[in-house]
């Protein structure tokens, strides 16, 4: 038998989703900046 | 997996901090430091952006391996006091999320390493992740007291990866640094396992003190410390490092050996009274940081 799971609290679910979305957005922006910087660095290597 | 079922099906999505906890950030600091040292002592300079990316990839790779380790060992972690509060045993995250996160991060780190540096560094990073997850976590850890002896190789890769990221190849010095961490791992973990052996015993992990006893473990700690000290000093007589490194590595290794001998001669069986073991465990972390720090200083400041 499965143990009783805690009843999902809407506010808590929203809070966590919001937190994950913000962290994901920040990481994606940082990734884009990193790929841009890597491209510039690689181009300068072959110049 | 063993028969113990861990309740990991959660009703609310895991917090982002729990994903961060899956990467074992504290363990990562040593991995990042030794990887950075490998990169800095390499004879070929690397563009700072590419160097930063290489270290980031080493950190992400280590995080991926840690996440996959926690995914596989959720049942063991639940039985040990030291690990019971981790996201999976505590029920704050479901196992599938941890698996997806670990696999995704592993692929991401290896691909980014290949794009930013070279194939050799990416290949060694991939091997180190696979070694930690498949050889150490899945194959050895639950089967043999030699688990951390062979599995220690996984933690020994970072300086080799750092060196390979800068040069595209592997030389004698990174091979020695690999051997140093490889030989350092058993005394480090066995010192810990002496005073938390009841935890390992409860979880059914065949660590050396559980299987072979405390006396054998104490002797093995000292025996492994001897070749470790020799490898730590070796770069100096081999002409791969200068006198500054040689003097510091010799002094630190002598202190390590003295502490290991103290552990070897100790007769304490009560974990709370194991001061020598706790001291050796704490010093072993400082030792590795100091050895790699000395090597970098020797190369960058005193060369």
Image (cartoon, coloured by chain):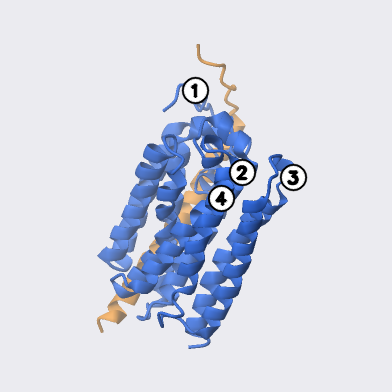
Chain colours: A orange, B blue
Q: Circle 2: is it few (<14), some (14-19), or many (20+) Cα within 10 Å?
A: many
Q: What is the secondary structure assignment of the residue under circle 3?
A: helix
- Chain containing mark 3: B
The numbered mark at residue B194 is 2
Dot 4 corresponds to which residue? B219
- Chain containing mark 4: B
- Which mark sits nearer the N-terminus, 2 or 4? 2
Q: Residue B230, how many percent across, how many down?
A: 48, 68
- Which mark sits nearer the N-terminus, 1 or 4? 1
Q: What is the secondary structure assignment of the residue under circle 4?
A: helix
Q: Could you give the CA–CA distance between mark 4 and mark 3, rounded to whole angstroms?
A: 18 Å
Circle 2 or circle 4, nearest the eye? 4
Q: Are marks 4 and 3 on the same chain?
A: yes
The numbered mark at residue B159 is none
The residue at the far bottom in this view is B303
Q: Could you give the CA–CA distance between mark 1 and mark 4, rounded to whole angstroms?
A: 34 Å
The relative height of residue A39 versus residue B129 in the rendered view (above or below) is below
Q: Left or right: where does residue B181 sit relative to residue B275?
A: left
Between residues B194 and B27, which one lies in front from this camera angle? B194
- Chain containing mark 1: B
Q: Please say if the residues under marks 2 and 4 sit with CB atoms less than 8 Å apart.
A: no
Dot 3 corresponds to which residue? B273
The part of the image, by quadrant, that contains residue A35 is bottom left
Circle 1 or circle 2, nearest the eye? 2
The relative height of residue B147 versus residue B248 in the rendered view (above or below) is above
User: Which quarter of the rendering shows the N terminus of chain B?
Assistant: top left
């Amino acid at each position: 038998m499965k143990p009783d799971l805690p009843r999902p609290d809407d506010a808590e679910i929203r809070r966590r989703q919001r937190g994950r979305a913000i962290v994901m957005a920040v990481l994606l922006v940082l990734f884009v900046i990193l790929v841009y910087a890597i491209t510039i660095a690689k181009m300068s290597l072959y110049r | 997996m063993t028969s113990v079922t861990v309740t990991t099906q959660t009703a609310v999505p895991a917090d982002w901090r729990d994903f961060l906890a899956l990467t074992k950030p504290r363990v990562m600091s040593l991995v990042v430091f030794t990887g950075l040292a490998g990169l800095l002592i390499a004879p070929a300079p690397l563009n700072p952006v590419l160097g930063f990316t290489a270290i980031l990839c080493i950190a992400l790779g280590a995080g991926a391996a840690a996440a996959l380790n926690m995914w596989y060992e959720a049942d063991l972690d639940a039985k040990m006091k030291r690990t019971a509060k981790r996201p999976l045993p505590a029920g704050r995250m479901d196992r599938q999320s941890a698996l997806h996160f670990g696999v995704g991060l592993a692929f991401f780190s290896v691909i980014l390493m290949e794009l930013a540096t070279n194939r050799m560094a990416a290949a060694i990073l991939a091997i180190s992740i696979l070694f930690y997850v498949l050889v150490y976590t899945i194959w050895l850890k639950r089967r043999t007291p030699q688990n951390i002896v062979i599995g220690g190789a996984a933690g020994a890769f970072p300086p080799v990866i750092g060196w390979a990221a800068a040069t595209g190849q592997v030389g004698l010095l990174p091979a020695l640094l690999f051997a140093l961490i490889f030989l350092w791992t058993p005394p480090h973990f066995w010192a810990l396992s002496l005073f938390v052996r009841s935890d390992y015993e409860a979880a059914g992990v065949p660590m050396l003190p559980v299987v072979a006893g405390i006396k054998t473990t104490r002797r093995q700690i000292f025996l492994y410390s001897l070749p470790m000290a020799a490898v730590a000093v070796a770069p100096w007589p081999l002409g791969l490092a200068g006198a500054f490194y040689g003097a510091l590595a010799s002094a630190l290794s002598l202190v390590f050996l003295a502490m290991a001998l103290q552990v070897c001669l100790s007769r304490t069986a009560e974990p709370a009274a194991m001061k020598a073991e706790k001291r050796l465990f704490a010093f072993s972390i400082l030792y590795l940081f100091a050895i790699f720090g000395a090597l970098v200083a020797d190369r960058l400041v005193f060369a």
